[in-house]
Amino acid sequence: MKKFLIWLLMIAVAGAAEPVEILVQGAEKLEVDEIVAALEKPVKTNIGPFSFWTGQIGGHRVAVQLTGQALINCTTSTILAIEEFSPKLIVNQGTSGAQAPFLTLHDIIIGRRAVDYSAFITPVLQVGQGSVALDWTPQPQRLRDLKTGRLIEFPEGFAGDAGAMTVAMRTRNPMGRVFPGVIGSAHEVNLEMDRVRWTHRIFGMDVEEMESGHVAALAHAYGIRYIAFRVVSDAPYEGIPFYAQAARATGLFTVNFLRNMPAL
Amino acid sequence: MRGHFLRAFLIPLFFAGVIACVPRAFAAEQVDALLAAASDAELQPLLAKLRDSHQESRAAWQFWIGTLGGKQVVATRTEGDPLNAVAATTLAIRLYAPKLIITFGSARAHDPLLRAGDLVLSGKFAAFDGIISSVVPLDGGSDSLSWQRLPHPLATLGEKETPEYFFPADVKALEVAKTLMTPRGKVVVGVLGSSAQTNREADRIAWIHAHWNTSCEDGESAHIAGCARLMGVPVIGLRVIDGTEGEAASRVMDFLEARK
């Protein structure tokens, strides 16, 4: 299997594919199914363990990518995708847990910014003094600016592309409402309401998930336009548990967005 | 055979469109090892020894390519966090196809038996940042010592995921690393843990050690190992507990020498 993976990677490395205008990402199969189904003349490619489907939607040349969940998968696969397809815009979309009380199942948040909330430094506590998560100090994602050599901190995360935001806010969600908001990423599922309230207060997060803040950092590093859409698939304030099929809403919304988006 | 070929390739091709896996010439340089460390200070002793070297960069990440101890290597700076580390590692794999990844540097002890100067070799790696909490209503507080581990669901061919709590280290490289000596401590085989966290609560460190079996923590090693596992590249980790500047780099030089 190892040699096969290397072989697949080497095939891809040998020469980048034809560039695409838009790279559309989803972490799980349910999150990309509607978009792959909308592709005209789809062509499937594998790079390492990751699957891509290229084709046309709304006049755009698009690559749809299954990133896998969380930082290791999405960072690895996004770097491979950028190097392979040189996209002008990245759309990261999928499901999320509501962190704001006004959100309910099938609502979609358009990411006016996306932030990694996984990094922190704890206070110094001795044995027997416990662990106080609500006292942890967040640490910002940093990226190096190679022109100046400086490491730049991004405590607010990364802003969504203004042009893509405008189009997204005019796009119909066939299954719920649409709001601009803040998307937070970490390899965490937070169901303690006090911590949910804390992340909302500290980071301004409206929803939590596992990829968009990380992909936003990579897009920023490459200077690629970026936007994230997240449908609410579970709403702890309302006691709504995870509903995987909510992914269909963001898939259909993304197809509508691609059809509304003017040429890049 | 034709029947098997039809079932294995042509039928999926019919449903998925034309599969674009047409072999092309391999264009990347291939190096013996990728040397990944968090900072300039940790890399510098090795960069100073690089022969016939040149530098390349991509987006926010830099690579130094050259010869070290007679081997062709590439070095990169991971910035000490998972995102930068995985990004730099992925780029290095794509651009330079290393035969082995060496993640090295300093680490903070989780195992109470470890002392400053001890060298921990990666028996395996744990990216211990995955958690899921229980449902607790408002004003019920947050208890991080009651959280459960969340594995990393590594992408697997065929649009599948394989949940993994630990990532393996290369067995042959580990055998070589076991021959190393360290001037101010002992050499142990353990679990290198990483996350974007700096844990200084004794009870939480004990919780991570108990649940993930971590020997120590740093900002990138297990995430690099996860990336290496995704891409099928062997990996080894060398971590000095509370290491001094250049200490881990010296062990990397020893390792490269022992590997000849």
Image: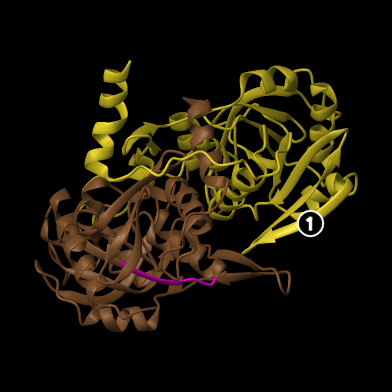
Tag 1 subunit: B
Magenta region: which residues? A223-228
**Residue at 53 percent of width and 71 percent of height:** A154
Q: Is residue B99 above or below residue A113?
A: above
**Residue at 82 percent of width and 54 percent of height:** B54
The residue nearer to you, when weighing A52 against B126, is: A52
Look at the image and tell me whether residue B222 can be seen: yes
| Relative image position of residue B174 (x, y in whole percent) | 67, 21
The residue nearer to you, when weighing B258 against A181, is: B258
| Relative image position of residue A105 (x, y in whole percent) | 12, 62
Q: Is residue B194 above or below residue A194?
A: above
Instruction: Tell me the quarter of the picture where residue B122 sits.
Output: top right
Magenta-colored stretch includes residue B142: no
Give the residue type that dot 1 points to.
Gln
- Quadrant where the C terminus of chain A lies? bottom left
Tell me what hue chain A is rendered in: brown
Tell me what hue chain B is rendered in: yellow
| Relative image position of residue A222 (x, y in whole percent) | 55, 67
Q: Is residue B103 left or right of residue B2?
A: right
Q: Is residue B4 above or below residue A57?
A: above
Look at the image and tell me whether residue A116 can be seen: no
Q: Is residue B204 left or right of residue A113?
A: right
Residue annotated with mark 1: B55
| Relative image position of residue B217 (x, y in whole percent) | 59, 40
Instruction: Tell me the quarter of the picture where residue B4 sits.
Output: top left
Labels in figure, total? 1
